[in-house]
Image (tube, rainbow, N blue to C red):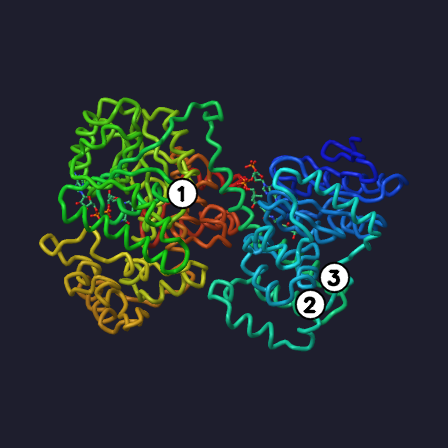
């Protein structure tokens, strides 16, 4: 029987199967909640029904509350009304899980009397990634099944666990067959009926939590031993309070506290920002003009040119995905060094227990080193990662034009150079695009896919699909100096260098960034990357602090000193040498130093970046503002809890940003002139992410 557009109830003997079919992920929308309540009522009223199986159609069990509803008051019936209906059922309800039971989906299963799952199913509370805690009983019911310690780990990390682990932990009662969930669930329910199985409610179980009652030290120790990220997360304190309630309060009081904290977090700026990033990361894949029908090319083999910092990391992405790679260098020592670095990377992962020796060897076996560009004649995609020099890149692409098979995609990993000019060095510019990886290329999630003016849409579609295949977040961008990320970064770099001459110290600038939420300050990043990128002693002019530091052999962490001094554990210390150098340099250049506030540091580093983002949007280099946020959240450590630069600008207010930029423009010049789009949106009281 159809209950509503997303739920149905079907009788199978004594058992009623309540099926949810609400693509894509069966989130707990209003229609789903209503459907479950109405279906349960039918099942209750039907004397022939002895038990209910709750399951989902499609690719997954309920993957959570409907995140699109967050931020506004929940429509009635809300999630708690739905759970009350489940808890009030007088016939056993069995949740039958496949795919992912996440967040509110997992909590729905925890309000059922029994839980079974297919072997490939998984469970978890990913709420912390959205700046939330489980808010539909998860913090009270999970501890009653698995104890306080395990609950702390699972909820603070947001990490999923599989059905086998769920069975071992007592979260589920049984595993079903992989392809017989429905039949096995009906059989399980029949057995419960025959055995007169009780209406087992988690709320009535407390043996797993009593051991923590009156012992606050248990949670304190868990927090002390947790890793840095978890200790720093602002949601952790809420998890602690909720678990303390689970241990010490009656379940109804614990639930009430959890609900109150959930709503407090849901209406926070941080959660709104994290939800923005969640949807933005899914939006990037939607490219106007490209559809599922756009033909993509098959990529079975890849060539990488250059086995330096980037080439090696790039190659690893494909090896990890089981795609054979040919890597080409100009000379044997460079080739050997590159291959050795890849091997060492895999060995380290094996040592950490995150990869088996066999898998590491299988990946290395997919790698073919070569000194001949001609060897790339049969691969489907070639990625060039040679020196950042237009003449060299053009020469390489000219040669590739003669070597690559027809239809092969020719990509450049250039950081700044004009992809159209590189494409023009070939007779097939439609096959050329940019694939801009970020360092370390085997780790960083971001991939800027640069569409040239002649790039064939099929190649864009292929690159997007490939990004997904190798686990990257692919953001499509257009051609300009530095594309989206590096072009905006240039604004920050200019200002941070200006600020230390005008009055701040590198550690002041870094501290302000850390307080804002960046994982590292920009000067620490510079020290880590090496101050000598693109620098050489022969051409050094000593005209910037960075050049002088290189000349002093303070080239960053690798030399034990850069903007900071480093101890033997690579811990940074403010450097008196650098302080004196900066004061000296400013004096020699006639720069009068003054006290610079933290507010000025933040505004001058972030607002010009936002302004550049507006220009990027206006020029159509990025498809939408949220794509820029995805670039910054995944490639440059912009705090996700601020939502990326464009979302952050929206929260601050565009009129405020314009006013501050104009004020700096009056004092410091045209670098701060507000972009026309920014001014226009501010005048209209609009936002970037409308
Ligand atoms: N609410 C609304 N929409 C959601 C959603 C949710 N909980 N989860 C996923 N979607 C949407 C996505 O936005 C996407 O939409 P689109 O096709 O229009 O872009 C679509 O579903 C498919 O999502 P994915 O691309 O992520 O699909 P995958 O197959 O790669 O992954 C998944 C599936 C593992 C379920 C993944 O979508 C996921 O992790 N979802 C979020 C799960 C989550 O965070 N749940 C907790 C929500 S908070 C909560 O439940 C609070 C509670 O405690 C009260
Ligand atoms: P690198 O100097 O570490 O490596 C370049 C390698 O290319 C060297 O090993 C060199 O021997 C080799 N090479 C030069 N000419 C060649 C040719 N004709 N044929 C084959 N091999 C050749 O440089 P890195 O850092 O790996 O940069 C490579 C490219 O990636 C540049 O365009 C750079 O701008 C870009 N990039 C660099 C990032 C970084 O953080 N290092 C980040 C993103 C992009």
Give the label, 3 or 1, closer to the camera.
Answer: 3
What residue is shown at x 60% (from left), y 74% (from top)? 218
What residue is shown at x 54% (from left), y 50% (from top)? 273
SS state under label 3: helix
User: Horizontal placement of 454 versus 180: left or right?
Assistant: left
What residue is shown at x 28% (from left), y 30% (from top)? 379
- Dot label at residue 613: 1
In the rendered image, the quadrant that contains the C terminus is top right
SS state under label 1: helix
Horizontal and vertical percent position of residue 540 = 13, 55
* Nearer-the-camera pick, 105 or 183: 183
SS state under label 2: helix
Query: Relative to residue 46, is residue 524 depicted above or below?
Result: below
Give the label, 2 or 1, closer to the camera.
Answer: 2
Q: Which badge, 3 or 1, comes first in the chain's sequence?
A: 3
Horizontal and vertical percent position of residue 625 = 46, 40
Q: Which badge, 2 or 1, comes first in the chain's sequence?
A: 2
Which residue in the structure is indicated by mark 2?
208
Distance between mark 3 and mark 1 Cα atoms:
43 Å
Q: Which badge, 2 or 3, comes first in the chain's sequence?
A: 2
């Amino acid at each position: 029987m159809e209950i509503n557009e997303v739920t149905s109830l079907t009788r199978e003997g004594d058992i009623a199967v309540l099926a949810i079919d609400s693509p894509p992920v069966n989130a707990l929308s209003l229609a789903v909640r209503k459907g479950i309540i109405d279906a349960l009522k039918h099942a209750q009223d039907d004397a022939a029904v002895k038990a209910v199986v709750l399951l989902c159609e499609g690719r997954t069990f309920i993957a959570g509350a409907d995140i699109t509803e967050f931020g506004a008051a929940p429509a009635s019936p809300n999630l708690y009304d739905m759970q009350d209906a489940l808890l009030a059922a007088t016939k056993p309800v069995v949740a039958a899980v496949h795919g992912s039971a996440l967040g509110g989906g997992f909590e729905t299963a925890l309000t059922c009397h029994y839980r079974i799952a297919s072997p490939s199913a998984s469970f978890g509370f990913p709420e912390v990634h959205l700046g939330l805690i489980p808010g539909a009983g998860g913090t009270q019911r999970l501890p009653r099944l698995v104890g306080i310690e395990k609950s702390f780990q699972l909820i603070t990390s947001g990490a999923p666990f599989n059905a086998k682990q769920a069975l071992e932990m007592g979260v589920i009662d049984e595993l079903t067959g992989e392809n017989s969930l429905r039949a096995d669930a009906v059989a399980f329910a029949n057995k419960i009926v025959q055995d007169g199985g009780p209406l087992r409610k988690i709320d009535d179980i407390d043996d797993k939590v009593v051991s923590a009652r009156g012992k606050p030290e248990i949670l304190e120790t868990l927090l002390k031993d947790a890793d840095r990220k978890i200790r720093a997360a602002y949601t952790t304190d809420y998890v602690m309070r909720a678990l303390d309630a689970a241990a010490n309060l009656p379940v109804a009081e614990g639930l009430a506290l959890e609900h109150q904290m959930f709503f407090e977090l849901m209406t926070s700026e941080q959660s709104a920002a994290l939800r923005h990033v969640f949807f933005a990361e899914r939006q990037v894949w939607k490219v106007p003009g490209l559809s599922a029908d756009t033909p993509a090319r098959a990529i079975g083999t890849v060539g990488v040119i250059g086995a330096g910092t980037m080439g090696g990391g790039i190659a690893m992405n494909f090896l990890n995905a089981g795609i054979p790679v040919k890597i080409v260098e100009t000379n044997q020592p460079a080739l050997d060094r590159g291959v050795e670095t890849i091997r060492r990377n895999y060995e380290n992962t094996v040592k950490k227990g995150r990869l088996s020796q066999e898998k590491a060897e299988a990946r290395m076996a997919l790698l073919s080193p070569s000194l001949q560009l001609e060897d790339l004649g049969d691969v489907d995609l070639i990625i060039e990662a040679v020196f950042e020099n237009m003449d060299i890149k053009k020469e390489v692409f000219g040669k590739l034009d003669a070597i690559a098979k027809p239809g092969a995609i020719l990509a450049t990993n250039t950081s700044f150079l004009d992809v159209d000019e590189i494409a023009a060095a070939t007779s097939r510019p439609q096959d050329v695009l940019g694939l801009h990886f970020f360092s370390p290329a085997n780790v960083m999630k971001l991939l800027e896919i640069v569409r040239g003016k002649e790039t064939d849409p099929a190649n864009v579609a292929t690159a997007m699909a490939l990004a997904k295949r190798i686990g990257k977040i692919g953001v499509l961008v257009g051609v300009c100096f530095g594309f989206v990320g590096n072009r905006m970064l240039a604004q920050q770099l200019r200002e941070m260098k200006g600020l230390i001459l005008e009055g701040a110290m590198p550690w002041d600038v870094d501290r302000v960034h850390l307080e804002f939420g960046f994982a590292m300050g920009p000067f620490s990043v510079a020290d880590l990357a090496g101050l000598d990128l693109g620098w050489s002693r022969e051409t050094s002019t000593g005209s910037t602090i960075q050049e002088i530091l290189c000349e002093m052999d303070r080239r960053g962490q690798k030399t034990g000193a850069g903007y900071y001094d480093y101890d033997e554990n690579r811990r940074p210390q403010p450097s008196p040498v650098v302080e004196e150098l900066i004061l000296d340099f400013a004096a020699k250049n006639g720069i009068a130093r003054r006290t610079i506030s933290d507010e000025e540091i933040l505004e001058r580093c972030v607002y010009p970046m936002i302004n550049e983002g507006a220009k990027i949007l206006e020029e159509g280099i990025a498809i939408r503002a949220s794509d820029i946020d995805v670039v910054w959240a995944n490639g440059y450590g912009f705090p996700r809890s601020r939502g990326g630069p464009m979302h952050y600008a929206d929260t601050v207010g565009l009129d405020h940003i314009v006013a501050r930029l104009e004020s700096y423009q009056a004092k410091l010049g045209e670098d701060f002139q507000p972009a026309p789009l920014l001014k226009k949106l501010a005048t209209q009281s609009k936002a970037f992410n409308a």
